[in-house]
Image (cartoon, rainbow, N blue to C red):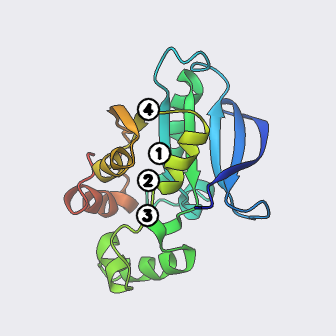
Amino acid sequence: MKNMMKKQAEAVIPTPFGSFKLIAFSHRAGEKMPHLAWVAQNGTADGAKTPLVRVHSECLTGDIFGSKRCDCGEQLDAALRMIGEEGGVLLYLRQEGRGIGLINKLKAYRLQDTGVDTAAANVQLGFPEDGRNYEVAREMLQQLNIPKIRLLTNNPLKVSALEKMGIEIEARIPIVIPPQVENEFYLQTKKMRMGHLI
């Protein structure tokens, strides 16, 4: 039988975006880098409204250190603000660099500095353009008893991947982040090569 994702620990965390219950999910109790669910402590507790959900893949450089090479940190903040105001859940998945990990992401950045776009850099390193797997998101939503969502994303592949896993998506809600000089080429690549709706 498959080893299913489980809730390992939880606590209420006050943030600038509101109060959230932070739940750590993993397959093993001793996991040091669990996937995380940030559940807003308002808005959707009675189930009257389909919750806003953001499935966000970890980006250490953007989320924590404010890197301008991407828009990940800005998307994270915008999603937490929207979910904090309206209610819902942010799933924080440990899939750094679209699944290639931090070390390889830094190697990809070096390639990008020579003019290679973000998708081609992953391929040159021997990885798919986007190697993320959303099975853990499906398991987390099941454990949170959320069968239907309004998905905060610009990525149509994420929509189709979750729908194929049986998650009902009532609506796709865009996250609009103005481009900066440092990430304009990155955002154009996401739009033109990877089909993001930005």
Mark 3, residue position:
132
> Which mark, residue 75?
1
Mark 1: few/some/many CA within 10 Å (<14, 14-19, 20+): many
> Which mark, residue 122?
none
The quadrant in which residue 141 appears is top right
Cβ atoms at labels 2 and 1 below 8 Å apart: yes
Mark 2, residue position:
71
> Is 34 drawn above or below residue 19 in the view shown?
below
Q: Earlier in the sequence, mark 4 or mark 2?
A: 2
The quadrant in which residue 167 appears is top left
- The answer for how far apart the CA atoms under marks 3 and 2 are is 18 Å
Which is in the foreground here, disc 3 or disc 1?
3
- The answer for how far apart the CA atoms under marks 4 and 2 are is 23 Å
Cβ atoms at labels 4 and 3 below 8 Å apart: no
Q: Amino acid at mark 1?
A: Gln
Indicate left or right for 9 with 171 as reference.
right
